[in-house]
Image (tube, rainbow, N blue to C red):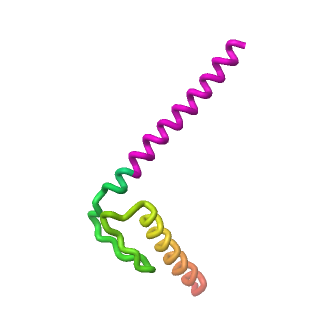
Amino acid sequence: MFCAKIKKMKKRLKKIKFVLVSFLLFSGFFKSVRAADLEVSWPDSPTGIELVSSTSVAELTRYFYEWGIAIGIIIFFGSLVF
């Protein structure tokens, strides 16, 4: 019975460690993404979204999503031709 409690505590401690490490890694990542200055001038997306130094993570995700869709459409029509 005592061993079962120790195993249960170890499992719980592993979960807590995982959550803490994940939080620390992701919070640092998102903080650096927001604070980073854009050193490259990126072209506007196909729908006209412009990236500036105050661009949020959501807008950055939308920007890459729109480019992915546009490139996918080009590849699709290219595969129809060939």
Badge count: 0
Q: Residue at x 58, y 87 (%)?
A: 81
Which residue is situated farthest in the right direction here?
Answer: 1
Say which quarter of the image contains residue 45: bottom left
Q: Looking at the image, is 41 positioned above or below residue 33?
A: below
* Vertical comparison of 7 with 23: above or below: above
Is 34 on the left or on the right of 80, as rendered? left
Nearer-the-camera pick, 31 or 81: 31
| The N terminus: image quadrant | top right
Residue 5: percent from the left, percent from the top? 67, 18
Q: Residue at x 49, y 76 (%)?
A: 71
Image spot of residue 82 (x, y percent): 58, 84
Image location of residue 19, percent across then percent down = 53, 37
Q: Nearer the viewer, residue 45 or 31?
A: 31
Task: Identify the main secondary structure in magenta.
Answer: helix
The range drawn in magenta is 1-30
Q: Nearer the viewer, residue 81 or 20?
A: 20
Residue plotted at (54% across, 79% down): 73
Q: Is residue 7 magenta?
A: yes
Judge whether residue 77 is colored magenta: no
Could you tell me residue 47's position as x and y percent?
45, 80
The answer to which quarter of the image holds residue 14 is: top right
23 lies above or below 32: above
